Amino acid sequence: MFSAIRQSLCRLVAPAALVLAAGVAGAEPQHGIAMYGQPALPPDFVSLPQANPDAPKGGSITFAVNGSYDTLNPFITNGSAAEGIAPLTFETLMARSFNEPFTLYGLLAESITTDDGRTFVEFTLREAARFSDGSPVTVEDVLWSYETLGTLGHPRYHGAWKKIATAEATGPRSLRFTFNVEDRELPLILGLRPILKKADFDGKAFDVTSLDRLTGSGPYLVDKVDPGVNISYRRNPDWWGKDLPVNQGQWNFDTIRYEYFGNPVAVFESVKNGAITAYREDNLAKWASRYDFPAITSGEMVKLEVPHDRPSGIIGLVMNTRRAQFADWRVREAMIQMFNFDFINQTVTGGAAPRIASYFSNSPFAMTPGTPAEGKVLALLEPFAADLLPGTIEGYALPENDGTPANRAALRRAMALLEDAGWTVAADGILRNAEGAPFSFEILLTIGQDEAATISAIYVEALKAIGIDAKVTMLDSAQMKTRTDTFDFDMTYMIRTMSLSPGNEQFLYWGSDVAEAEGSRNWMGVKSSAIDAMIGAMLSAGGQDDFTAAAQALDRLLTAGRYVVPFWFADRNLIVHRKELRHPETVQLYGDWGNSYLPALWWYEE
């Protein structure tokens, strides 16, 4: 079943696998698994607590998407995939409950088995698990999916595959992965890999764009496909998993549709006239000012605020450290100093949005800005002290602004930093280095990112005061993907969301191994042994205290690295929707996260 290369790799790591698998004896199959502790729900649970098991089936919901798409394969680097393909039509071995930090319950798999050290994981498939064409989901399909995604799929799948020493069938419906590294999150990560049908790719290349419909096992089928215009999905009446407790009260709409638009003005007009029936607003000022159109005042559409307890993540303008001028931390700090947060926030949101102070703001994993590292956090950082940037251990905080447009104190601090880095303002008023080259750069944005465009315009004007020539370039989504996949940018708008159980995805965001891998999420290009070590410490932590300390240490490294000019975050999700679209009274821990809340838990009711 494995390729010749993979078989060779398995032979090479087999001795390590035998050692790591020593704890297999005595491990028992379980209905679920939590990153720490035990799953909150017992084996006989009837539904997730955030779901309404009595929700009626029927009706439709329509979303808006900026941009276009050219492939129905969302698992590869090439192309722009249609919205909804993976969550609506494919399934994983385990399903995540977003009312817990990181807990999985059986979906395609009826059970999961691992040992105390989590040196291996074994899954047993449900006998009833079926693809949408009625064919069974087999162990062969699962093993093929993991290897194919791990070698030919998007880079986000590659890291976990490299940590697998052996992958083997252990029975007609069971399979086992044995690991070659210590990574306590890995059993959960593997439980969330999409399972594809091997036969779909017989005689076909996996890693090329295609509008061929793939065979999934999920609740929906692809219905109508019109690239660049829309895509719709219809609920599969023969969905094999519709009666599973983990699915009760979920995926209730008969039809889910995504309409594509070239600009946000057209999107909002479609919201106002009812063509878009559910819309997420991400601007607090607009939320307060522009939602007074007739459908709102008549009650045909409803405004909803959904609280959450998620970390802020990082949202802002990321600097590409592969570019010479942004390789110097002093220049990056100057860029942050020149971002007049208080003035821009007041201008764009009315001052309503809370500032992002660090990558894990709004969570227990956040460092305390401006304070020195102590205890376990300090112990983790000390081995790397000689190479750490100023502020990492002794304390770093984002600069304070006076709120005036001139922002003179920050301007003086920025100029001092730039001079230290070899940049001075010449007689012509242009900031130049020792060779006379001007300091100029481009901010790349996607068409439709209006808020980021407004922020960037204000920022560009401020930079002129110190002789920097910055310009904003707007690209369509396909062009932007190509440029960011190949790291062909100076500065661009970036969002990296964070969960309440950060783990392997951190390697994808800022791991050294993916810094030069085309399509990786490490846009900043950071290569840091300290960052790699902190992520490793998170993954090997045996308890919550050690995990939290590693996360706080990582937060310090990223924030003091000055890689991003941070904006603000939303401490609640903002949704406007047709009154016929209903939602559970219970709000899950993660709020409106991905598709897990809207549309998964919603329903249509006249």
Image (tube, rainbow, N blue to C red):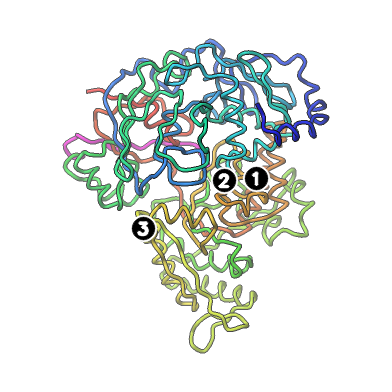
The reply to whether residue 452 is in sight is yes
Circles 1 and 2: CB distance less than 8 Å? Answer: yes
Q: Is residue 466 magenta?
A: no
Measured along the vertical axis of the image, is residue 525 above or below residue 198?
Answer: below
Residue named by callout 1: 552
Question: The residue under label 2 is which amino acid type?
Answer: Phe
Q: Which amino acid type is marked by label 3?
A: Val
Q: Which residue is mark 3?
A: 348
- The correct choice, above or below, for 402 with respect to 142 in the image is below
Q: Secondary structure at mark 3?
A: helix
In the picture as drawn, the residue positioned furthest to the bottom comes out as 427
- Quadrant containing the N terminus in the rendered view: top right
Disc 1 from disc 3: Cα separation: 30 Å
The answer to whether 548 is drawn above or below residue 352 in the figure is: above
Label count reads: 3
Q: Position of residue 434 (x, y in %)?
A: 63, 82
The alpha-carbon separation of the residues under discs 2 and 3 comes to 23 Å
Q: Residues within 10 Å of mark 3 (few under 14, many from 20)?
A: some
Q: Earlier in the sequence, mark 1 or mark 2?
A: 2
Q: Residue at x 55, y 23 (%)?
A: 94
Q: Position of residue 483 (x, y in %)?
A: 49, 57
Q: Quadrant of the C terminus?
A: top left
Say which label, 1 or 3, has the lower sequence index: 3
Disc 2: which residue = 360
Range of the magenta residues? 296-311
- Tell me the amino acid under the disc marked 1: Gln
The answer to whether marks 1 and 3 mark residues whose Cβ atoms lie closer than 8 Å is no
